Image (cartoon, grey):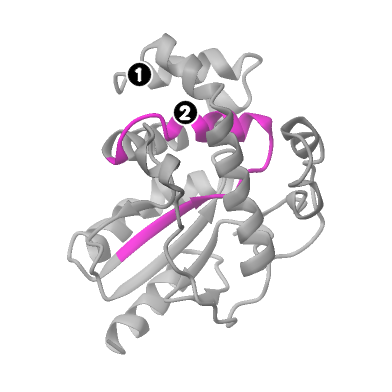
Amino acid sequence: MSYNRSAFVRYAFGASMALMLAACGDSSETGTTGGAKFDMPATELTAEQAAAEGTWGDIVYGDPNAPVTVVEYASLTCPHCATFSKEHFPEFKKKYIDTGKVKLLYRNFIMNRVDLMASAVARCGDMEVTQKLMSVFFARQYDWARSENPVDELASLARRVGISRTEFDKCVNNKEMHKHLMALTKTAVDDYQVNSTPSFFVNGERMDFTNFDDLDEKLTKAIGAN
């Protein structure tokens, strides 16, 4: 279960944001096969990012001291990512996150202009607000991602968690957050060979993911090894 796109940020990151986004397109590449092992530290933030409003770096679900770490790279416009969020994440959270066995680090993998807007808005508030927005955006993806006016659709959804239109517009146009999100995507491509979403790493090991049973099996083994 993966949604492939071109790793356009590899060559475009040094150019302007407009050029980077214009380079986004479909890809015939298949996802990297599982088994590769990576050192995957927490995303480092600059002093300015750490002091700024909004959620920067990893979106963290669960106990930071949990023995098993899952890193998920996903796109808010990826249908399979939405399926995981709606149909499988509640079970994953109940079984592994709420019990303190696993923490999940969500990292954006930007695919297109609409994805960039939605991701910037999702990181508008603190971690709790961000998690709520991520859930809402994935749950209603079909509506806003295919809308003739996705900005208004996203603004309407953001109001449900207390984001005013003024604040929404500010977040949509936050160029520093845009650069940060593109940097997360570039790191995924350059350092971890990510070229499809959703992509999962369990304690740094890339896994082939076709359904929740794959992740469930991998986590059972990882927890047993700790």
Query: In the image, is 188 to the left or to the right of 200?
Result: right
Q: Position of residue 77 (x, y in %)?
A: 59, 38
At 23% from the left edge and 58% from the top edge, which residue is drawn? 94
Q: Residues within 10 Å of mark 1 (few under 14, many from 20)?
A: many
Magenta span contains residue 215: no
Q: Is residue 223 positioned above or below 213 on the image?
A: below
Q: Is residue 2 visible?
A: no
Q: Is residue 13 visible?
A: yes
- For the image, the number of numbered tags is 2
Which numbered dot is residue 163?
Answer: 1
Q: Is residue 152 positioned above or below 177 on the image?
A: above
Q: Position of residue 118 (x, y in %)?
A: 53, 30
Q: Is residue 210 positioned above or below 76 on the image?
A: below
Q: Which residue is mark 2?
A: 121
In-front residue for pair 66/51: 51
Q: Is residue 45 positioned above or below 29 on the image?
A: above
| Labels 2 and 1 touching (C-beta < 8 A) | yes
Q: Position of residue 103 (x, y in %)?
A: 31, 63
Q: Position of residue 18 (x, y in %)?
A: 76, 30
Q: Give the magenta part as a residue range.
A: 103-127
Q: Residues within 10 Å of mark 2 (few under 14, many from 20)?
A: many
Amino acid residing under circle 1: Ile
Specify the farthest residue to the left: 99
Mark before the other along the chain sequence, 2 or 1: 2
Q: Quadrant of the N terminus?
A: bottom right
The Cα atoms of the two marked residues, 2 and 1, are separated by 9 Å
At 63% from the left edge and 29% from the top edge, which residue is drawn? 114
Residue 19 position by quadrant: top right
Query: In the image, is 111 to the left or to the right of 218?
Result: right
In-front residue for pair 184/50: 50
